Image (cartoon, rainbow, N blue to C red):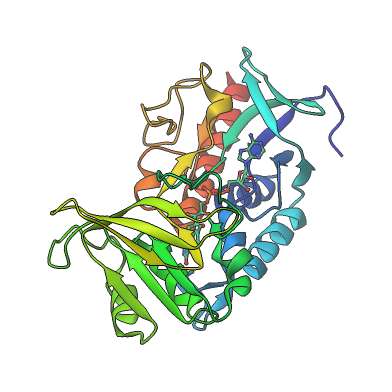
Amino acid sequence: MVAQGSPVDVAIIGAGPAGLTAAIYAGRALLSTVIVEKGLPGGQLNETDLIENWPGFAETVSAPELMTQLRSQAERFGAEFVLDEVSRIEPGDSVHSIIASERTIQARTVIVACGSRPKDLPAEGADRLKGKGISYCATCDGFFFQGKRILEVGAGDSGLTEALFLTRFADSVSIVVRHPMDDPRAFRASGILQERAKEHAKIDFLWNRVVEEILGEDHVEGARLKDLTTGETEDVPIDGVFVNIGHLPQTGFLRGTVDLDPEGYIMTDGCLRTNVPAIFAAGDARIDANRYAQGVVAAGEGAIAAIEAEKHLAAAESA
Ligand SMILES: Cc1cc2nc3c(=O)[nH]c(=O)nc-3n(C[C@H](O)[C@H](O)[C@H](O)COP(=O)(O)OP(=O)(O)OC[C@H]3O[C@@H](n4cnc5c(N)ncnc54)[C@H](O)[C@@H]3O)c2cc1C
């Protein structure tokens, strides 16, 4: 157990794939390691059911189970988990203070692995009907849409994965795509997912449209879609909307401490060092990594950040 006030070698903020992998590497380097997580360890991969692109598994594997294993692996090498939300970092000369809701942690190095969260649907009624037919998590809510008509907004990897998952429950899944079918920008998803979605009997595509309004008083009853070429709108009857239109980095608590890009992603050099000495960043919250938004990329960055933290500590000790 980390004593209050006594500095740890590495404090990690966020227990997604990046933070958990950083904890494994830091623990195996015999560095005292604390990992602060405000929710369920595992990060965004807790929001999906199956994962089939994690190296080392010939068969599809349960993503939450994989994250449980990662957590156990980090604990095996001595990482201490703390359930708390970090509100700011106060940089010091050789020790940084991590201010969380219920404690302050002193750390010689910090790895920020705080990830991102889904962007809200920019349509009238979307805020009012959130949780009343509008969902940002198919794994959490898909079950409630058995036999229903669903609109999926987003045609990236996550959007198509979600749409395919939802076909288990729904009667139909219509995917709204903001570009025409023959436009190379129509899909951002990998080829194999595109093929599966196109071939699926329950899935159809609504090309060249955006969602202008979600219709319904106290639950979703339909959506008003706008054709981007003609400007004409059309109301389609649906029972639920699943949104997958990108993410926002959860970096508000870093503003004024480390350099962020205009969208809030953490800026680093190639060794994942921020502009503040001994503060590193890894995973989806980091500039460049967010372009890929993949668990395995985040995990790889967690490893790099921990190795760089170890090098920093070794250099500081021999100075
Ligand atoms: C539906 C879905 C399906 C996906 N499918 C795949 C897939 O098949 N394959 C794949 O490789 N990737 C997939 N991904 C992407 C993958 O989940 C992410 O790329 C990966 O989780 C990013 O890891 P991360 O550690 O950077 O951040 P995250 O997983 O976002 O974890 C960050 C953690 O930090 C915590 N945190 C944030 N701020 C604070 C704070 N201030 N204090 C304390 N804790 C904080 C958060 O609670 C969170 O647990 C999917 C994502 C989604 C949403």
Q: Is residue 160 visible?
A: yes
The answer to whether 113 is drawn above or below residue 54 in the figure is above
The residue drawn where x is 53% and y is 18% is: 257
Q: Residue furthest front?
A: 217
The answer to whether 182 is drawn above or below residue 204 in the figure is above
Judge from the rendering whether residue 259 lies leftward or rightward of residue 98; answer left or right. left
Q: How many marks?
A: 0
Residue closer to the observer: 86 or 212: 212
In the rendered image, residue 115, in percent from the top left (x then y), is placed at: 53, 44
Q: Is residue 278 visible?
A: no
Judge from the rendering whether residue 45 lies leftward or rightward of residue 246; answer left or right. right
Residue closer to the observer: 143 or 185: 143
The residue drawn where x is 53% and y is 47% is: 302
In the rendered image, residue 188, in percent from the top left (x then y), is placed at: 28, 60
In the rendered image, residue 190, in percent from the top left (x then y), is placed at: 30, 68
The image quadrant that residue 314 belongs to is top right
The residue drawn where x is 57% and y is 40% is: 114
The image quadrant that residue 161 belongs to is bottom left
Judge from the rendering whether residue 155 lies leftward or rightward of residue 183; answer left or right. right
Quadrant in which the N terminus is drawn: top right
Quadrant in which the C terminus is drawn: top right
The answer to whether 38 is drawn above or below residue 167 in the figure is above
Judge from the rendering whether residue 140 lies leftward or rightward of residue 32; answer left or right. left
